[in-house]
Image: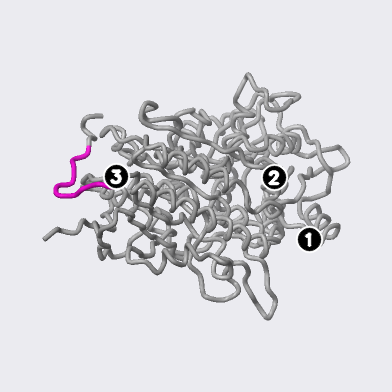
Amino acid sequence: MDALKLRSLEGYVPPEGPVVLVVMDGVGLGPADDSNGVWLSHTPVLDGLIEGRLYTTLKAHGSAVGLPSDDDMGNSEVGHNALGAGRIFAQGASLVNDAIASGRIFAGAAWSRVRERAASGGTVHFIGLFSDGNVHSHVDQFYALLDRCVAEGFAKVRVHPLLDGRDVGPKTALQYLHPLEARLAELSAEGRDYRVASGGGRMITTMDRYDADWSIVERGWKAHVLGEGRHFASASEAVQTYYDEDDGITDQYMESFVVADEGGPVGTIEDGDAVLFFNFRGDRAIEISRAFEEAEFSHFERVRRPEVFYAGLMQYDGDAQIPRNFLVEPPQIDRTMSEYLCATGVTSFAVAETQKYGHVTYFWNGNNSGYIDEKLERYVEVPSDVIPFDLKPWMKAYEITEEAIAAVAGGEYRFIRLNYANGDMVGHTGVDPAVRIAMETVDLCLGRLLRAVEDAGGVAIVTADHGNADKLWTEKNGVRTPMVAHTTNAVPFAIRDFRGSDAVRMRDVSGAGLANVAATVITLLGYEAPDDYEPSLVEPLKKA
C-alpha cells in the first residue's frame, strides 16, 4: 500500500472539515421545458449551486464512461466505476463486443463446457434481459451466441427473455419478441429444436439486486427452472394478453409466464443442461447466479436444484467469485481512489440506501466487494422500502441525510460520499408528479446537508452519475410516451467551498466527464492526484 501513498499538494491548505461528495442519481441537465422533471421541480438549492462560481457540466455517457459509442446512455454502474477509478475503462458492452468479434468468447473454458453439455444431449438455456437498451444486455450479443449454437450443431436451445420497458420504451416487448420467435422457428429445422420457454418483467422476475426482494428471483426460478406460472402458447401471446388485461401495465412490471403445449412446459431446466445468463452488467445478475450455484441456500425454497453447468456472460462479483464460470473477463480496475486514500491514511464514509448501496461501495471500488481498510472506512446501508418507487418517491433520502450529517458533525471522516437514489429510481417509473416530489425531496435534503458541511468548515461537491429525471416523456405525432430510460444529457458538477476564502478555481478541462471527479476530490483533500488519472477540475489559487 505504501506505493499508493499520495503526495501532499505543496502550498495548499486543506479544509478543516470533510470533503463531501453527493451523487444525485439520475439527475441530468435537460431542456428548460415541461418534458424535464428536474427543470419542472422546485429546487432552489440545486439552482443556486448551478449559478455558483465553482460549476461546470460533465459527460456521463458513451465513451466518457467506457461504453462503445456516444449514442449509449450512461448508467449507475459505469458511472460509479468512473467516479471511483479516476480513469475510463472499457465497460461490459465493449468488452463483450470485442470478445465476440475476435472469437475469444468461444475459445474459453466456459463455452467449451457448454459445448460438452449440448453434445451430451443437454438443453442450452439462455436467460437475460431481452432488449437493445445496452445497459444490462444487448440482443445483438444474444443473437451472436445463438448463431454459434447453430454453427456448432446444438440440438436443443431454450430462451427465457426478461422484458425490459426501462432502458427502452415502456411497452416495447413485442418489438423484440416477434423477431425472436420468428428466428427460433426458422432455426427449428434439420434436427434443431429452438424455442422460448419462459419470461417476465425485469422488476417482477429474476432481476433483483442488493438482496432487496428475493421473491423476484423466486418467481424467476419457478418459471425458468420449474415451469411454474401462468401458461401461454407463446411469449408474444403472454405479453399481448397482459396488455389486454391491464392497459396501464408496462413491460418491466409484467408477471412471469411459462410457454407450454399439450405436453406441459416446453423448457424447464433439468439435470445435464447448460444455463447461460447473458446480461453483461452485474448488479441484477448476482442473485439468480447464487440460486443456481450455492449448495447451501436459504433465500427461498428451490424445490429442486438441477445439476447444470451455469455461466454468466461476465463474472458479476470478482471478490465473491459469482458466478464461478463466465464467458468474458470483466474490466480490471485497479488503483481506485479509495485504495489511494487508504494508503495515505485518509478516513472515509459512504452511505446510500439498498438500491444504490453497491454503487458507493462495490462499483466505486472497482467492482470489488468489502472494505479496502476497515480501520479507515465505514459503509452504511439504509434499507430501501420494498414498494413501487412512485408510491413513496421520497424513498430514504431523509435517513441518508441524517447519516451523512452525523458523519460530517462527528469529525472522524475526511472524505464522505453518498448517493440519493430518487432521481433515478423514481425517474424509471415515468410518473410525473412522483418525479417532482423525488427531486424536491433531494433538494430539501441537500440544503440540510450543505448547512452541516458549512458548520464543519468543509467542502461539498454535488454531481450526478447519469440522466433520467430530466426526461419525463417523448413525443411523436402529438402523442406523448413516458420516458423511463436514462438520458445522454450532461450532468451538473458544483463545488461549494465553505472555508471563507477562494482556495481553488475551476480549470478549463476539455471534454470533462465523471472520471475527472476522483482527481478533483484528491486535490480538494490536499494531495497530488496520480499522474494517469483524468485531470482535476480545480486548481489551488496561488496566494500573493
**Structural crowding at the residue carrying mark 2, measured as other residues with C-alpha within 10 Å and reported as few (<14), some (14–19) or many (≥20):** many
Closer to us: 226 or 477 = 477
Circles 1, 3 touching at the beta carbon (< 8 Å): no
Which image quarter: residue 279?
Answer: top right
Up-down: is 537 above or below 258? below
Q: Position of residue 309 (x, y in %)?
A: 59, 28
Q: Earlier in the sequence, mark 1 or mark 2?
A: 2
Element on which disc 3 rests: loop
Extent of the magenta region? 6-15
Q: Earlier in the sequence, mark 2 or mark 3?
A: 3
Residue wearing tag 1: 248
Q: Is residue 230 visible?
A: yes
Residue wearing tag 3: 16
Report the residue that reaches farthest toward the top. Answer: 296
Is 35 in the magenta?
no
Which image quarter: residue 319?
Answer: top left
Residue wearing tag 2: 194
C-alpha distance separating marks 1 and 2: 32 Å
Q: Is residue 192 visible?
A: no
Is 13 in the magenta?
yes
Q: Position of residue 134 (x, y in %)?
A: 53, 55
Report the residue that reaches farthest toward the left. Answer: 544
Q: Position of residue 18 (x, y in %)?
A: 35, 44
Q: Amino acid at mark 3?
A: Glu
| Magenta span: chief secondary structure | loop
Q: Nearer the viewer, mark 1 or mark 2?
A: 1
Q: Amino acid at mark 2?
A: Tyr
Report the residue that reaches farthest toward the bottom. Answer: 477
Q: Earlier in the sequence, mark 1 or mark 3?
A: 3
Circles 1, 2 touching at the beta carbon (< 8 Å): no
Element on which disc 2 rests: strand
